Image (cartoon, grey):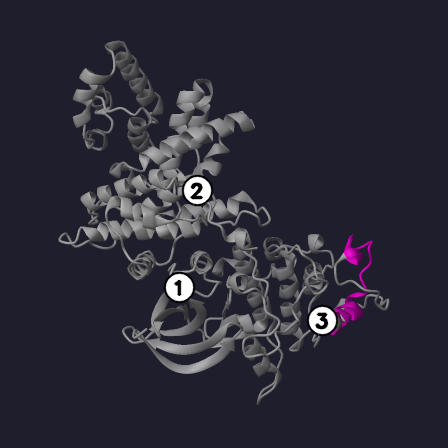
Amino acid sequence: MEKYEKLEKVGEGTYGKVYKAQDKATGQLVALKKTRLEMDEEGIPPTALREISLLQMLSRSIYVVRLLDVEHVDKNGKPLLYLVFEYLDTDLKKFVDSHRKGPNPRPLPPSVIQSFLYQLCKGVAHCHSHGVLHRDLKPQNLLVDKEKGILKIADLGLGRTFTIPLKSYTHEIVTLWYRAPEVLLGTTHYSTGVDMWSVGCIFAEMVRRQALFPGDSELQQLLHIFRLLGTPTEEQWPGVSSLRDWHEYPQWKPQILARAVPTLEPEGVDLLLKMLQYNPANRISAKAAMEHPYFDGLDKSQF
Amino acid sequence: MASSLLFDLENPLTSADEEQHPFSDSIAALFAAESDHMSPIAGGHLDLSARRDAVSLILQAQFSCNLDPSVAYLAINYVDRFLSKRQIPSDKPWVVRLLSISCLSIASKMKKTDLFLTDFQREEGFIFDAKTIRRMELLVLGALDWRMRSITPFSFLPFFLSFFSPAQPPLLHALKARASRILFKAQNEIKMLEFKPSVIAAAALLSAAHELFPIQFASFRSAMSSCEFVNKEKLGECCNAVGDVAMDGCDSTFEMVSSSNTPVTVLGRHCSSSESERTVGSSSDDHDLKKRRISELRGALRLS
């Protein structure tokens, strides 16, 4: 760890403190994440070993935040593991916030939304093609390089060792805004659709500059979704009423989605609709999304 | 959920119990990544005697702890990659033992196999304490950049098997089983380290096919060598090398038959055992048969 100099605390990740630090030898900025993985008599814990090597494999994509190094320090005779990631100066939440408030509020340029969404789909497709679900995609987990216009997925993979907690270790409530309806309804079988739902919510948020479904409890979260997309029926989503946490809900009719994203062009609305399908099996895949006509005007060769 | 992280030699990129994904994406990724997982001997400083000692200790552990061969296979892969990056001080031969034990420990964790090495160490007449092994584990992990989901020849078997026709499960199963045995054996050969994992996989399957399904062999070979990812020339060389292993032989005829083609690679083998084998072991008929089969295989595998 003497390789790095801690500069400042940049956040409280779901799993622990995150520091901005600098590689003393190269000057490179990095993000240091302390894990709470302690080594015992058996050496490196098997789950940590398997997860970190998975993370290492996934971070080959430039749309996934790169794991640069794994460091260990002895703390009271017990080694602690630190993960060293590449550092990016901002995340999508801060980026969108800076367009909503502050000295110069303005919409995100449509070309930026298009490019970020494409990169997000590309990163998600990469993870999915390696059999890995993110399960907690949200603007805070998407790091942005403003200068280069690059977006990268962060906080990947660790979801499994730690399981997705309801409260982070600082007792901050974990946001539910991007959580897919099947997760909120207590499904036991997760699929790639959970991530695509989150991608849809993030897409809409870039357009609106505010969250599409800002619920503050699991029930409120579901009601937000139902009020916009209509209460789901057995017909459009077979099996929904047998999910663990299903109850009888008020019957809402679907609203016109384009009204929630008034500045979005029709192709974009169509893609958003395909991401927000109730039945996870009908939700568009990341790979198919990349081929959607919404991206026709984008120069894909740059990615 | 945790089981989905289990590392499978055949499937380093995808976790087994997740949704199935289109082959094409992951296979291109595999070919792109395989070079990161090699342990080049040419130009490198792989310590051959350390390697030999480590391999023999790991195989010893495999038998004495009744380990799954894939755990030993993975451990040897870690040893090779470690040795191609770090030097072992020659005045500290115990480091090789520590390295072998640590690589076995990491491999068994990746495969979620329980491994009790204490008894084995005691049998072998040494014992490292937990803290020492832990430190060595971290050294190995660091040297290998924590890329422990090794891409090995096994990773490519399912892909290359898809070139075999007829695609009947019992045939494919037999072919894969035979090729796997060849791969386990071939790992002991230092020469194999020269080849990319994909090339070794293709060569092992061709060798298995030649042995088991001679009728389908020709079409299998041509389908495989038309694959965009395969370098035909390298495959030819590797087939020669695998042929040696597959036939379990070390015969001077080899060299004569193949010297026109690949003089260096074939002559690289040590043939010290062949003389004694000849006099002690087999009858001359067996010997001739074996010789004939080997040269047939050589000819058949030649791709040019």
Residue A179 image position (x, y, % from top left): 66, 67
Establish whether labels 3 and 2 are both on one chain.
Answer: no
* B265 lies left or right of B91: right
* A256 lies left or right of B214: right
Q: CA distance from mark 3 to mark 2?
A: 42 Å
Q: Residue at x 70, y 52 (%)?
A: A281
Establish whether labels 1 and 3 are both on one chain.
Answer: yes
Q: Which amino acid does the dot numbered 1 rest on?
A: Asp
| Quadrant where the image shows the N terminus of chain A | bottom left
Label for residue A40? 1
Q: Residue at x 58, y 50 (%)?
A: B18
Q: Residue furthest top?
A: B285
Q: CA distance from mark 1 to mark 3?
A: 37 Å
* A237 lies left or right of B20: right
Q: Looking at the image, can residue B165 be seen?
A: no
Secondary structure under the numbered disc 2 in the rendered image = helix
Label 3 vs label 2, nearer the camera: 3
Label 1 vs label 2, nearer the camera: 1
Mark 2 Cα shell of 10 Å, populated few (<14), some (14-19), many (≥20): many
